Image (tube, helix red, strand yellow):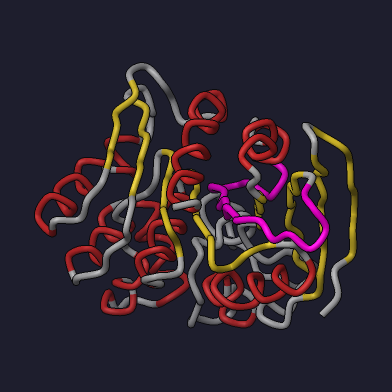
Amino acid sequence: MSLTIISAVKAHGGEQRVYSHPSSTTGTEMVFSAFIPDHLSGQKLPVVWYLSGLTCTHANVTEKGEYRAACAALGLIFIAPDTSPRGEGVPDDPEGAYDFGLGAGFYVDATQKPFAKNYQMRRYLEVELPDLVAAHLPVDLERQAIMGHSMGGHGALTIGLRNPGRFASVSAFAPIVAPMECPWGHKALTGYLGESQSAWLAYDACALIEAGARVPHLLVDQGTADPFLDTQLKTHLLVAACEAAGQSATIRMQEGYDHSYYFISTFMAEHLAWHHARLTR
């Protein structure tokens, strides 16, 4: 399968690219960004996958995440996919809400009509996109890490937990840690997967940890001034799940920070250095 370069610009001793490609998984054209540090010909680099939150595309972190200098210094490829399928005929929330449909795929494989045809984001991220990237970019899939923000933090946690041995490390900014216990999650999981909560378990980080899933290294930063902390994110549930299950985790409450990219960009370089230390052991 081919990649089309939409744009490519020099930055921080590397190249920031945006690609598009036809996806057999979603049945749509998909877009992702990739920062590739300068490297020796034939050399493969470790890769960090970044999953974005509600309403976002690849562009939010690409434009505001402030990751390129750190990735260039550390020798990390940084890949940011879209948050949902898009295009003519792709179903959206019938009321146009921001928390379901376009920009809100929740990184699940939908089973409910009309969403099942296109909203196959789990399989896209776990299978199709890594295979495509490995075929065209200098990534070393033996050295992978995954991270994300909000809904993307939920995606990073659940993808990491469902794929033991694939990722050296997992981190998140303000993740939705227990979608089964919050309004955003209830709406998305019901709409994409149906009413049976047994189908939701694979998409809830706390439930996965309680069922025995583990990641080797976990880092979470959560702002104390985040307006979604108590109602949607519920970080305390992840703390409790990790403590009860013996899952090693560093979960930090960052005083005064909110849910925005001002928060994310503040700690982005620290997260990337943390991943790098675990990718190069």
Q: Residue at x 89, y 65 (%)?
A: 4
Q: Residue at x 61, y 53 (%)?
A: 96
Give left or right: position of 138 versus 149. Answer: right
Q: Residue at x 37, y 67 (%)?
A: 203
Give left or right: position of 34 versus 247. Answer: right
Image spot of residue 187 (x, y percent): 40, 60
Q: Nearer the viewer, residue 106 or 216?
A: 216
* Quadrant in which residue 206 is drawn: bottom left
The residue most toward the top is 256
Give left or right: position of 85 versus 50. Answer: right
Q: Residue at x 40, y 39 (%)?
A: 174
Note whether 255 is above or below 111 in the view shown.
above
Note whether 236 is above or below 266 in the view shown.
below
In the image, is residue 242 part of the stretch drawn in magenta?
Answer: no
Image spot of residue 200 (x, y percent): 33, 72
Image spot of residue 270 (x, y percent): 48, 31
* Quadrant in which residue 23 is drawn: bottom right
Q: Nearer the viewer, residue 214 or 149?
A: 214
Q: How many marks?
A: 0
Image spot of residue 1 (x, y percent): 82, 80
- Over which residues does the magenta segment extend? 39-60
